[in-house]
Image (cartoon, helix red, strand yellow):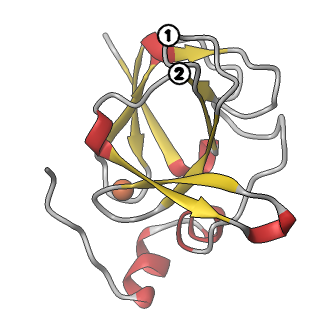
Amino acid sequence: MTDKLSLTDAEWRERLSPEQYQILRQAGTERAFTGKYEGNKATGVYMCAGCGTPLFSSETKYNSGSGWPSYTAPVEADAVNELTDVSHGMARTEVRCAKCEGHLGHVFPDGPGPEGLRYCINSASLDFVPKD
Ligand code: FE
């Protein structure tokens, strides 16, 4: 299990871009089809934009048509935490980075893999590191 990263609000504002802050720290959502990784097909690993923890791999990324980067699984089950989210009049499962508790997106039970899960993640919550 990873150690927690806990920063003050001022430190997060310093570290993150305004868009990253709004999504990671305020549970915002980027507009569909606007994120930089939605159509990214390169091989590599997607790190948490807040703390650098590896969260998702290109190996589990697929085109869900939703407008957000979509994965069938995280790189490690304990890299993310899943929480019940009843905001906006919906019952959803929120996905957060286990280390910094940054908001990543949501997970839905309509994915194509063996687990049947779709991790629907904001590009702004991720930093892609290509494999060379
Ligand atoms: Fe993180």
Residue 107 higher or lower than 37, as above or below: below
Vertical relation: 7 (above or below) 66: below
Mark 1, other Cα within 10 Å: few <14 / some 14–19 / many ≥20 = few
Image-based side of 106 in relation to 9, left or right: right
> Looking at the picture, which amino acid does disc 1 mark?
Pro
Q: Residue at x 55, y 17 (%)?
A: 61
Q: How many marks?
A: 2
Q: Position of residue 108 (x, y in %)?
A: 66, 36
| Circle 2 residue | 72
* Along the line of sight, the residue nearer the viewer: 48 or 10: 48
Q: State the image quarter where residue 76 is shown.
A: top left
Query: Measured along the vertical axis of the image, is residue 6 above or below residue 88?
Result: below
- Front in this rendered view, residue 110 or 32: 110
Tell me if 92 is positioned left or right of 42 in this view.
right
Disc 1 target residue: 114
User: Does 110 sit left or right of 103 as displayed?
Assistant: right
* Residue pictured at 81% horizontal, 29% vertical: 66
Rendering coords of residue 86 (x, y %)? 71, 67
